[in-house]
Image (cartoon, grey):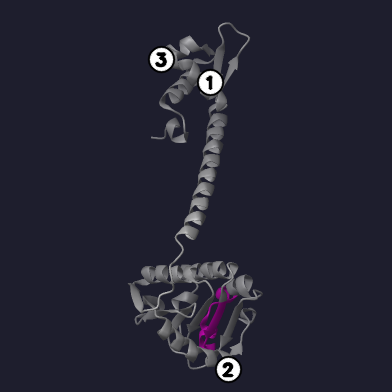
Amino acid sequence: MASLRDLGLSEYEARAYRSLLDAGPTTAKELSRASDVPMGRIYDVLSSLETHNLARSQSASRPKKYVAVEPETALNRLLDDKLEELEEQAEQYEGIVDDLTEELDAAEPVEEGFWTAAVGPEESTDLLVERLDAADDRIVMVAGDSSAQFDIGDVGDLVAKHLEAALDRGVKVSLLMTPELVETLPPSVGERYTETFADHPEFAVRTTEGLQGTFNLIDDVEVCVEVANPLNPGEAFAMIDMKDPEFAAGVRKKFAPRWEEAKPLSFGGL
């Protein structure tokens, strides 16, 4: 059951306010009896209700009388106070994250090979966007056939969102795909990428024939390979992440000439 305490009132404050609603204009002594709030606490409780603009007092009367503010107005005021409090807390947490991000910055780059894998569509997507978020310098995306990263659903939207965040922090993004894949993309995908990336100076997309599979090269030291579901090629079956500078350098070496010979493409033409 919903309670006034859920909106920040104490037990005594909640009792006093409810009793004020029932009693109408009343004195502190009368309210203490009606609400079971001890007489030694009733004035502090009434002062708090006035501070929250939930009650008003008639100072000219002797003894002073109090009246409750109408419930709709009172509840909206409590809601506004709670939302303001949550906003302040969110800003505090954001500040903590910023401070800890600098304090817990990654150590030296990995010099020896390390790999991990995620199995299943959701787990694969989580691993992919995690690695996209880790990029500091450059992201290379290569897609040779249908890929979950460029679908019309939630995954494509999520990847686009994280790519946009990467661009915002200065990461260069290069996308290489086959013309056949371009032809299979729904118009909404082209529209989304056009609106988000087309005019960005750090985003480039090209097409070339003969690509197989889908992978992402992160900062020239890490490779994320998408394993397609053989029963549903548009869905990721697994994601393999290899952080190996030597292996990544080999991938980069093979990618460079394919990129140079590829044809620039504008998503606006989709």
Q: Earlier in the sequence, mark 3 or mark 2?
A: 3
Nearer-the-camera pick, 16 or 249 = 249
Q: Is there CB contact under 8 Å for labels 2 and 1?
A: no
x and y, in percent, of residue 64 in the image: 56, 10
Q: Residue beneath label 3, please?
A: 38
Q: Amino acid at mark 3?
A: Pro
Tag 2 secondary structure? helix
Nearest the eye: 107 or 40: 107
Q: CA distance from mark 3 to mark 2?
A: 84 Å
Range of magenta residues: 173-190
> Which residue is pictured at 43% across the width and 28% down the height?
10
Left-right relation of 40 to 177:
left
Q: Residue at the location (55% across, 29% down)?
A: 74
Could you tell me which residue is drawn at 49 percent across and 51 percent down? 96
Q: Per the image, is 175 magenta?
A: yes
Residue 78: percent from the left, percent from the top? 53, 33
Point out residue 68 in the picture as x, y percentages from the top left corner. 54, 21
Mark found first going from the N terminus, 1 or 3:
3
Q: CA distance from mark 1 to mark 3?
A: 14 Å
Q: Is residue 239 above or below residue 261?
A: above
**Image quarter of residue 114:** bottom left
Does residue 149 appear in the picture of this structure? Answer: yes
Q: Secondary structure at mark 3?
A: loop
The residue pinned by badge 2 equals 261
